[in-house]
Image (cartoon, helix red, strand yellow):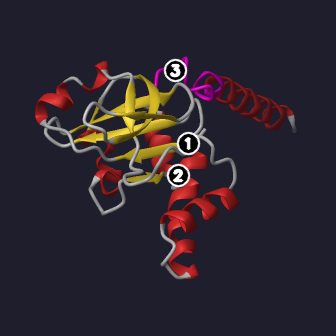
Amino acid sequence: MSIWVLHQSLSPDEESHIEQREHLVLPFDGLPDLSAVASQLQCRHLMQLLYPDDPPEAITRRVDRLWPRYSGLQKEDIIAVPLASRKAVALAEVGGKYLYRVGVSGEAMHLIPVTWHKAVSLRSLYKHKDLFERTGEPMMEVTRAEARIAIRDHLPHSYNRFAKWKWLLVVFFLMGLVRFFVRVAGQP
């Protein structure tokens, strides 16, 4: 499971109703439908068609930025959406595959279906606040282990498949300590 931070341009009213959305908009502005792109090579060919005058290095940079985001986003991944006016982070789980739609005014919409978990206070993730500040990257994968754990800890225990086993590890550790002390106490 990957964890992503996805910055959205939302008004305070849109932020207050974000949990009612069935899809999140992906930051693939200016691109056509990507649903037929199945490999990095196909992505490269698409970029060459869209930007025929760009040098190969520019095409490579475009592919290097797009492909990991497009191919890496999978069902059951977690998306953290910073909500500036609420000073919170909304957590959503990817519920399906990438979708492409054309909006009512003809704009391309790159979407991902989601189901929502509770929004958490930005203060509870303050140690990792740099992840939720706008840095120019509209979407990035969270790779720091400590940050991933902090975000996962805010998910329901039924989702966090490792949380239910933590208590077993503690029990085994305590049993090992008891055995150790019994052996030490039993030696002359």
- Residue 158 is a magenta residue: yes
Considering only vertical position in the picture, is 180 above or below 136?
above
Which one is earlier in the sequence, the residue at label 2 or at label 3?
2
Instruction: Check whether the beta carbons of the residues at disc 2 and disc 1 lie within 8 A of each other.
Output: yes
Residue 158, quarter of the rendered image: top right
Say which residue appears at 47% left-offset and 21% top-offset. Answer: 156
Which numbered disc, 3 or 1, marks the residue closer to the eye?
Answer: 1
Which quarter of the image is occupied by the C terminus? top right
Q: Which mark is residue 73?
A: 1
**Residue 175: numbered disc:** none
What x and y, as percent, mark residue 104? 27, 30
Q: CA distance from mark 2 to mark 1?
A: 6 Å
| Quadrant of the rendering where the N terminus is positioned | top right
Q: Amino acid at mark 3?
A: His
How crowded is the residue under tag 3: few (<14 C-alpha within 10 Å), some, or many (20+)? Answer: few
Mark 1 secondary-structure assignment: loop
Q: Earlier in the sequence, mark 3 or mark 1?
A: 1
Read off the residue under disc 3: 157
Is 172 contained in the magenta span?
Answer: no
Residue 35: horizontal and vertical position, in percent?
A: 58, 40
Q: Is residue 17 above or below residue 177?
A: above
- Mark 1 is on which residue type? Leu
Residue at point 69%, 61% (across, down): 41
Main secondary structure of the magenta stretch:
loop
Mark 2 = which residue?
69
The residue closer to the viewer here, 100 or 136, is 100
Q: Residue at x 46, y 27 (%)?
A: 113
46 on left or right of 140: right
Residue drawn at x 35%, y 54% is: 138
Q: What is the span of residues highlighted in magenta in the rendered image? A: 155-166
